[in-house]
Structure formats: structure tokens, C-alpha cells
Amino acid sequence: MKSRDATLIIGPGRVGSTLAVALQDCGWPLVAIGGRHPAGYKTLATRLDPNIFCGRLDELASRYGSAFPVVLLTVPDDVIAEVAGIAVEQGLVDRNSVVLHVSGFCSGQALAAVSSQGGSVGSMHPLQTFTGTGDAVSGCHWFVEGDEQAIEISSRMVSCLEGIFHLLRGENKTLYHAAASIASNLMTGLVDAALETAGKAGLDHGEMLGALAPLLLRTVNNLIQHGPELSLTGPVSRGDVETVRAHVEALSKQPDILALYRLLASRTIDIAVRSGRIDEQCAAEIKRVVTDFDHPSSLEGEQ
Ligand SMILES: NC(=O)c1ccc[n+]([C@@H]2O[C@H](COP(=O)([O-])OP(=O)(O)OC[C@H]3O[C@@H](n4cnc5c(N)ncnc54)[C@H](OP(=O)(O)O)[C@@H]3O)[C@@H](O)[C@H]2O)c1
């Protein structure tokens, strides 16, 4: 292989396909794509230069006959270790290879099959969601961990992809991934809870989703531009104790959503204190309303 960065991507799924096209387009020396089923890699092949070989791992092994300098594993988290082992067995990876996966959760330790052979290992996670339908890669924030060589290659690859590079310690990946899930997946749960509550008020799901859109977008924009302290509005930030009490009472027939409201309202009380919007005394009063509310009367007749 001519280039010291000659790269093989294993796993032509959502991330693998997106990265393959982006790496090709930015001029990175992408050499081959490895997959399990022709349906996956043949579809991707139609979007790539014909010189980039797409095939099964055993076909790649017999075609190239030597290990790849860089291997990117874009397979599901649960099979990273297994596929790394197969790549080693097939001779696609050796002690001179740098192997990276793109999971936000697993660390480079999932690649023990490679490091035990003396190869370099790491992970580079794009903090973005990919559906495999032409999502942009430039401008992505990449969180990278691994050994020195893995970090060096990732840093150049991220720069080629016009991404933003961040270093992370392997042992902190679970917390990093939890943070991303809170901001993205749990936010989805939160909006779903808002829609269910609006449904109890007799509002149509689709109509309400459309109506919430400008509010959600402005909230997210404010958060991005100004941070939580300056973005917080609403009854907690104004110290409107009675409004919060009314919310808590009104939610008493939706115990799951009430639990969510209580937890997140407590969080926003802390934000309001931090930003100087309410004093400690007011905070304590709202906290009492949020945490001490017992809802026996509201639940009566709910059987
Ligand atoms: N999608 C996202 O938004 C996103 C964002 C950031 C990071 N990631 C990470 O990216 C990685 C891939 O996720 P994805 O969403 O792209 O998954 P995906 O769309 O399901 O693609 C997975 C690919 O791996 C192949 N594969 C599955 N099991 C295999 C095995 N045992 N041996 C060989 N190939 C196998 C699949 O091939 P078949 O078609 O043959 O099953 C498919 O090509 C994961 O580590 C994930 O955490 C995903």
C-alpha cells in the first residue's frame, strides 16, 4: 500500500458509509471497504470511486495480502471486539496498524485483539447523529482517545474532514456518552412528556409539536449562545411559587411526568440561584413545593 495512511473501513452502515464518502471527498487515502453482506457494501460502492475496493473481509485479505496501516471499525458497539479479532486473524491488521472505532461508549480497550499484537488502538467519536442519508460530516466535533499514534492519525483525519478535535481520557468515556445522551436522547423524552401533558389539556399532538417548535428552537439557540444561567426563563426563574405549586398539582395524575418535573425543576432552581435571579430563601420555598408535594387528594377517584 502506497500511503502510510491507506485506510480500510469495516462496516458500511450509517456511519461507515457517511465517513467513506466524506473521506473520499476530502482526499484521504481510502483504499477499501469491508462488509458482511454484499447488499451493504455494494450500495456504498455506487457512491465511491471504482478504485476503492468493496468486499468481504476474506476477499480483502486475499486481494491485498498485507495489513492496512489504518483501519476504521464502524460496526455496532457490541461486535467491535469480535470484528477486531477477525481483522487480526485475516491479516488485515498487524503490529504496524492503527485501528480506531467510532463508538461514543466503548474505549480503545475494546480493541484488545489489536493491542495484544502490538498494534495502535483508539477511538474517535463524532458527536453527531447519522442516518446514512447524506448527513454532513464537516463541522463535526470529534472526541478522541487512544495511544499516541492513534491520536496522531485521528487528529489528521479530523482536520481533513474539517472537524473539531477534542481529546478525552478512555476511562471518562461512559460519563462523556451519558452527557451526550442527556442532551440528545433524553431531550427527546422530555419533549415527548411535554406532548403527553399537552394531550391531557386536549391539544392535538401534531398541532402541538408544530407549536412547540419555535419555542424549542429559541431555547436551544439561547442555550448555545448564552449558557443555562442566562437562558432560563419561566416561573422558577421569577420565583413564582404559586405557579410551580399549580403545575405540580396539575401533574399529580401523571406520576412519571410529575417525577420528571420535580427533578428538573430542582435543577432549574439551582440555575436560578446561580444566576442571581432568586435568593436562597425563595429557592428553599420553591424546593419545598416541588419536593414535599404529596398528592393524595388529587389521586382520589383516579382508580
Ligand atoms: N448512527 C449514529 O448516529 C452514530 C453516531 C456516532 C457514532 N456511532 C457509532 O458508529 C458505529 C456504527 O453505528 P451505525 O449506526 O453506523 O450502525 P449500522 O448502521 O447498524 O452499521 C453497522 C455496520 O456494521 C456491520 N456489521 C454488523 N455486525 C457485524 C459483524 N458481526 N461483522 C462485520 N460487520 C458487521 C453492518 O453490516 P450488516 O449490514 O451486514 O449488518 C453495518 O454495515 C457504532 O459504534 C456507533 O456507536 C453511530
Image (cartoon, rainbow, N blue to C red):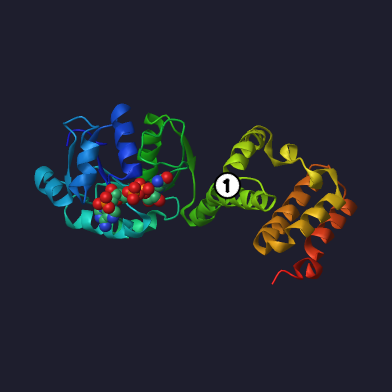
Is residue 86 toward the left or the right of residue 232 in the image?
A: left
Image quadrant of residue 148? top left
Q: Relative to the observer, which residue lies in front, 89 or 303?
A: 303
Residue 228 placed where, x, y %?
70, 41
Which residue is labeled 1 in the image?
A: 183
10 Å crowding of disc 1: few (<14), some (14-19), many (20+): few
Q: Residue at x 31, y 59 (%)?
A: 81
Rendered position, 283 above or below 63:
below
Q: Residue at x 73, y 58 (%)?
A: 251
Residue 229 placed where, x, y %?
74, 41
Q: Residue at x 39, y 41 (%)?
A: 131
Q: How many marks?
A: 1
- In the picture, the quarter occupied by the N terminus is top left
Residue 300 placed where, x, y %?
77, 71
- In the picture, the quarter occupied by the C terminus is bottom right
Using the rendered image of the protein, determine whether residue 25 is visible from the camera's viewpoint. Answer: yes
Using the rendered image of the protein, determine whether residue 124 is visible from the camera's viewpoint. Answer: no
Q: Amino acid at mark 1?
A: Ala
Q: Relative to the observer, which residue lies in front, 82 or 218?
A: 218
Is residue 255 toward the left or the right of residue 248 in the image?
A: left
Image quadrant of residue 249? bottom right
Q: Relative to the observer, which residue lies in front, 76 or 207?
A: 207
Rendered position, 136 above or below 111:
above
Q: Residue at x 28, y 30 (%)?
A: 24
Q: Relative to the observer, which residue lies in front, 8 or 153?
A: 8
Residue 201 placed where, x, y %?
70, 50
